[in-house]
Amino acid sequence: MLYRENGQFKTTYASDQQIFPIAQDRLLIVALLAFAFIAVPFLASEYLFRAVLIPFLILSLAALGLNILVGYCGQISLGTGGFMAVGAYAAYNLMIRIDGMPLLLALLLGGVCATAVGVLFGIPSLRIKGLYLAVATLAAQFFCDWAFLRIKWFTNNSSSGSVNIGELNVFGWVVDTPAEKYLFCLGFVAVFALLAKNLVRSHIGREWMAMRDMDVAASVIGIRPVYAKLTAFAVSSFFVGVAGALWGFVYLSAWEPAAFNIDRSFQLLFMVIIGGLGSIMGSFFGAAFIVIVPILLDNAPILLGIPIDTATASHLTFMIFGSLIVFFLIVEPHGLARLWSIGKEKLRLWPFPH
Amino acid sequence: MKLKSLALVATLAAAGAMPLLTSAPAFAQAKDQFFPVLSYRTGAYAPNGVPFANGFVDYLKLINAKGGINGVKVSWEECETGYATDKGVECYERLKGKGATSIHPLSTGITFALTEKVPTDKISLLTAGYGRSESTDGMVFKWNFPLTGTYWDAADVLIQHIGKKEGGQDKLKGKKIALVYHDSPYGKEPIALLQERSKLNGFDLQLLPVAHPGVEQKATWLQIRQNRPDYVLLWGWGVMNSTAIKEAVATGYPRDKMYGVWWAGAEPDVKDVGDGAKGYHALALQHGAEPNAKVVKDVLDLVHGKGQGTGPKEEVGQVLYMRGLMAAMLSTEGVRRAQERFGKGKWVTGEQARWGYENLALDQKKLDALGFAGVLRPISTSCADHRGDVWARVHTWNGSKWEFTSDWYEADQSIIKPMIKQAADKYAAEKKITRRTSEDCQSDSLETARKG
């Protein structure tokens, strides 16, 4: 009834090619952005910012990056944690070694370094596919873990191998309070999400998808596999590297290589699979599911006033969370994003489904 | 189709539950003195994390059973970190809003992350026997308190002890000492000091890292078999410790040439190995296993006796249980000290408690009254020294229990002090913070605390 595009006529190509062709969608996304940018900073508590929203935003950015590679280009990767680490450590080194380095530039250059490493480790994808590629990208993960643990130069000879960063200063704006940090991350995520959405709608995105669906057919119709696969690795690693830099700088502010270990790679891959492969929206759903649900489950006994000890609570969290993952994968193998679009389809017919 | 609508409903329900999170830290109680407890009762480090947490919570229960801190009752809440840094940060954020004035992260990784957060939240970061060594310098690390000793102290004491065994520090020349360490900030902390010492004493230092969680050590011990170091220092935690001792048995490395840090010298580390662990030494952070201490009897009477004990009764008084008791005692004594200044029987703020931790004056009389006679030596802290006095002994596993086998040692501050100064200055330069002035030491906590 409310959600219908009846009467919305497209008279120009531009209006036909909008990201959100339906007016209600546009309205919703504008309202959502306004809510996130204007209302949330006033409403949310410090705990919500620091423990829920900031990690959620940063990990959704990383999931977005991984989704470009896995979801759109079909190249499975287990090196995401390693690429995040490259972004974080590169940004750290740029900050401490170059005097007067602007923070924004350092974060973006961190992404650029991750791009270089990503492309390097993406080269094997030209010859190997599927699970074999997963194993090859695993090498990236282990290599990065090793490099940041063992090569002292990367950690500025810190005796414990842990690095820490000073205050965050963006052209005079000191990003200090939780709300400011949240807005800083939100700004990044909003811009990068728009970038990703437009990339996947462009010719390069179509090349990625063609590669994913059938690489032989794609090369027959004139898509260069080298170019398509390596650009996917490059763009994906750039996103992931920036997310890694944000994770270190904004969320942890002091970190060790363990912050970007193999568990992080798996966590991100699960986000992409559960959220929905090949969907920008799905990256956000996946990140929300993986970040927020365990915290909710963990908090539940205390909030509901059920006294159980923390060990039991944490075992329960694992069990419930695990079964939820299985449940969602059985019900909807295409991820939460697919559920979302089913919901929208139903809403179109509501209240008179046929 | 039905299952799909179920999934839709589940998603909506999860979204609906979101506001629950917002209300989480809303109820800060002003009457009780709140102590957050970051613990790990699950995961690879649980065997060591559980007794510590039990001791910590039991001591808080004991405080309440004895009528609180000058009448102020204590309350606490546990949060499971699993020894993971990001989970630790989440726990910290969750618990700090409930009126926390101090926190023990019980993980060097979490300590590093929280060091950046505690100054703005006005919460003292207490790291009794771990943490970052340079945070001893209270002029730079205003909110960190590595009470009773750091890893640099531990490494120094171990080298002193080995030197003594060899018949003098000069005899260390040409010896080979291997450090088998947990490949994390925890295990890497002592390296800087050991390198300094190896230059000074002329011994050859071999570094053998073991990856988390430490169950795969075959390669490490193969290297030890090849190199035959004269001594092995073990910087492990959780399952890594017992695995290392088992591997030592398998490779035939003599156990009495192995020295663990004070986190690698408790019952869970050696129990499984049984007789094989006989002769294995470890540092004792002042206390060892103290089943006869008065405080242990108090816990058994007033907490376990009333059926309120946290863990199994047999574990009361074991090494890590005592470490938990000690950590909790240091937290509450800082508050008690702050009360002496800011009003007895009153709830203290984070800044007031910080003053208490910075001016700890636990003399023998106070320790005896608390039931820590023979367990701890007097500890006093100051603005420049946030660690206080460092005393350690070596204890040895005799197959069934830990026995002290050395006299008291004090770490050689002539080596450590310049290192602390240098590392703290480096941190200050990186973070662009200036050292506190001596006026800041005397006045600030008072003024700001009164205002607050």
Image: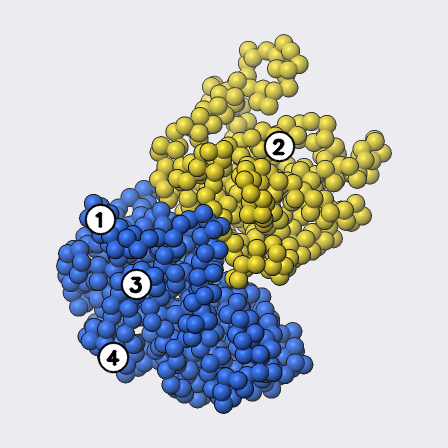
Chain colours: A yellow, B blue
Q: Which residue is the site of mark 1?
A: B447
Q: Which residue is mark 4?
A: B373
Compute the Cα span from label 3 to label 4.
23 Å
SS at circle 3: loop
Residue closest to the eye, A271 or A169: A169
Q: Look at the numbered disc 2 and give the secondary structure of its residue.
A: helix
Residue B382: mark:
3
Marked residue chain, label 4: B
Up-down: is A150 above or below A222? below
**Would you name the residue on which mark 2 appears?**
A196
In contact (CB < 8 Å): disc 2 and disc 1: no
Q: Residue furthest right?
A: A220
Residue at the spot 39% in from the left edge and 63% down from the top edge = B136
Do pointers 4 and 1 mark residues of a single chain? Answer: yes
Q: Amino acid at mark 4?
A: Ala
Dot 3 or dot 4, earlier in sequence: 4
Query: Which percent across, then down, holds residue B337?
Result: 21, 62
Crowdedness near tag 3: few (<14), some (14–19) or many (≥20) residues, C-alpha within 10 Å: some
